[in-house]
Amino acid sequence: MADLSIDFCGVKSPNPFWLASAPPSNTAYQVNKAFEYGWGGAVWKTIGTPVLNVSSRYGGLELGGQKLLAINNIELISDRPLDVNLREIAEVKRLWPDRAMVVSAMFESDPKVWADAVARIEDTGADAIELNYGCPHGMSERGMGSAVGQVPEYCTMITEWVTSAASIPVIVKLTPNITDIKAPARAAIDGYANALSLINTINSVVGVDLDSFQLRPNVGGKGGHGGYAGPAVKPIALSMLSEVMQLPETQRFQVPISGMGGIQTWRDAAEFLLLGASSLQVCTAVMHYGFRLIEELTDGLSNWLDDKGAASIQEVIGAAAPRYSPFNQLDLSYKVVARIDEAKCINCNLCFVACDEGAHQCIDLTANGAKIDPAAYSGVAKTQPVVREDDCVGCNLCSLVCPVDGCITMIEVPPERESVTWGEITQERPEVTLEWDKMERYREEKGIEIH
């Protein structure tokens, strides 16, 4: 059985799965129960000056009958007294010395306040501190949360206050509500952060009731933006993880990253690990299914590692990261085409409609081996879609809409041109970049400022 234990910037745990800083890690009762189920660690729900929370707090995204494809929340940091949180953190760490205990914190921008908070957190025996620079609602209006994470200078300043006062590792949690995730990542590293975690929740309005016109969640007839999380955000999290992993600073200083954002299955977890995350945080899936989820996560991940012949989790961390590439380094000569297995085809014609109306018109409809007029195909008893491979651009859309597994596959074909990338083209043909130059000159002539 593969070894799932990790050492994340000096913080050890028996497996990489930690509760994220959120409602499931709000009390000693919850964290103790999670550890009994087998969770490797927990990031305590963000502590600071206690707040008043609203009611209601959550809104859900449902699609095709699937509940909580994403969740939107307007819950703030812990509303429990600071002394109570600190006492319970110490109790849990004493009971579970082998589990990772990380304390998420958010205080006002005052170095003395932070120094005092760090000392009190360290007195609990906690393994690390996570700085919450991501909360997109409520706290950001008070100059905390994403208001810090969106301003690199603030990020560096507060991080340095904490790292200069702390003797335990400091993790900076990044906000996704920013144009370029690399800027705050660099800023955190400049402030001597020992590690990064990402992503926090995404700014969102999850929906509007079409009868009452009230936003979800509804607080006395009003609503607003909240934090978006759950399976639907995983692609965004994986993208931002990859961007930060490519930073020269991340690589030079070997800054570990704790990944989160839509992890619900062991397959999700494996994807984060392959792209470079070395610990994993879970929230929405626990809110949906409970702490017992850890059994599926650890068993599935362990079995997958065994299938890959990996003796430990360390052997797969970052294995796919080198495959992440800027667009201008992708090979323009590489080509795939779609092929339809007629024996598996159920003749639903979804591939034809998608290609004809939403893509590149590379699929014909045939009946008895002869091409038919698309406008008249609804009157034909049985039609068979056929790919014109010479015209197929390999966009994948037909294979994505096909409801039958393995019916449409993308097959690599011999290249039609020599291997070349856009990066190479722009070096050899400077005129390709002239369009941008023209836009710049137009902006200057018209006095248009870009902020």
Image (spheres, rainbow, N blue to C red):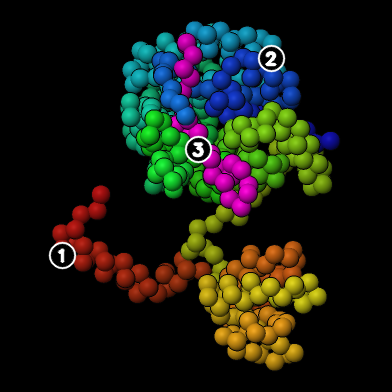
Q: Residue furthest bottom?
A: 370
Residue 339 seen: yes
Q: Nearer the viewer, residue 363 or 365?
A: 365
Residue at screen point 50% across, 33% down: 58
For residue 245, side relative to residue 301 (left or right): left
For residue 413, side relative to residue 429 (left or right): right
Under circle 3, the secondary element is: strand
> Residue 311: x, y in percent?
80, 38
Quadrant housing residue 91 = top right
* CA distance separating discs 2 and 3: 36 Å
Amino acid under disc 3: Gly
Under circle 1, the secondary element is: helix
Q: Is residue 63 magenta?
A: yes
Residues rendered magenta in the picture: 57-82
Quadrant housing residue 38 = top right
Amino acid under disc 1: Glu
Q: Which residue is mark 3?
A: 59
* CA distance separating discs 1 and 3: 48 Å
Mark 1 touches mark 2? (CB < 8 Å): no
Residue 161 is marked as none
Q: Which residue is mark 2?
A: 97
Under circle 2, the secondary element is: loop
Q: Which residue is mark 1?
A: 445
Q: Is residue 158 magenta?
A: no
> Residue 340: x, y in percent?
72, 75
